Amino acid sequence: MIKWNDKYSVGIPKIDEEHKKLIGIINKAVAASRHKDNSREIIGILREMSDFAQTHFATEETYMLECGYPDYEQHKKEHQDFTIETIAFLDDVGKGDSMLAHEILEHLKIWFVSHIQGTDRGYIDCFKKHGLV
Ligand SMILES: [Fe+2]
């Protein structure tokens, strides 16, 4: 489980809210990973996460474009890699290996927390300077 911590905050309410929602969905998947015969349930939750991640990435990418953020391309690529990876995971979980599902969720958790504490911090000044928040 990921517990929201103020150190995850980027200081931009709309983005913090979206990050909290994604954490909530990831936690739901982690809880489901403890259920029996859970592959369909986990696939459903991973789809929900992937759909909401698209909405959220679009929020960040729109702001980045609006403020002329210099690392836009690189940041967008991280989002794309995450999306591609999640789709591959959906296939893997579909094969029904619960150990694999556990590893996948650990990987998603680590990616997400390190992304919001690292890459996402890069745009804070740019967004604030351009009055986007
Ligand atoms: Fe991001």
Image (spheres, helix red, strand yellow):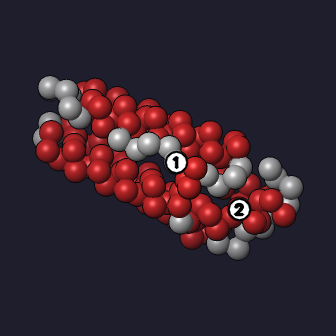
Provide the residue designation for mark 1: 5
Q: Amino acid at mark 2?
A: Ile
Which of the 4 image quarters holds residue 68?
A: bottom right
Q: Viewer-nearest of labels 1 and 2?
A: 1
Residue under the point 64% across and 72% down: 71
95 left or right, relative to 9: left
Instruction: Between residue 91 and residue 41, name the one nearer to us.
Output: 41
Quarter of the picture holding the N terminus: top left
Indicate left or right for 48 with 75 as reference.
Answer: left
Position of 29 relative to 15 (above/below): above
Instruction: Determine crowd level at label 2: few under 14, some 14-19, many 20+ residues with C-alpha closer than 10 A.
Output: some
Residue displayed at 30% across by 46% down: 105
Q: Is residue 33 left or right of residue 115?
A: left
Q: Is residue 93 above or below residue 36?
A: below
Residue 39 in sight here? no
Label 1 crowding class (10 Å Cα cut-off): few <14, some 14-19, many 20+?
Answer: few
- Is the CB–ligand 1 distance for label 1 below 8 Å? no
Say which residue label 2 marks: 124
Cβ(mark 2) to ligand 1 < 8 Å?
no
Q: Is residue 24 visible?
A: yes
| Displayed quadrant of residue 85 | bottom left
Residues under numbered marks 1 and 2 in contact, where contact means CB atoms less than 8 Å apart: no
Residue 98 at x, y percent in the picture: 15, 39
Residue at horizontal 44%, vertical 42%?
3
SS type, badge 1 = loop
Q: Earlier in the sequence, mark 1 or mark 2?
A: 1
> In this orientation, which residue lies closer to the viewer: 120 or 62?
120
Task: Tell how many labels.
Answer: 2
Q: Position of residue 14 (x, y in %)?
A: 69, 42
Residue 33 location, x and y as percent?
23, 34
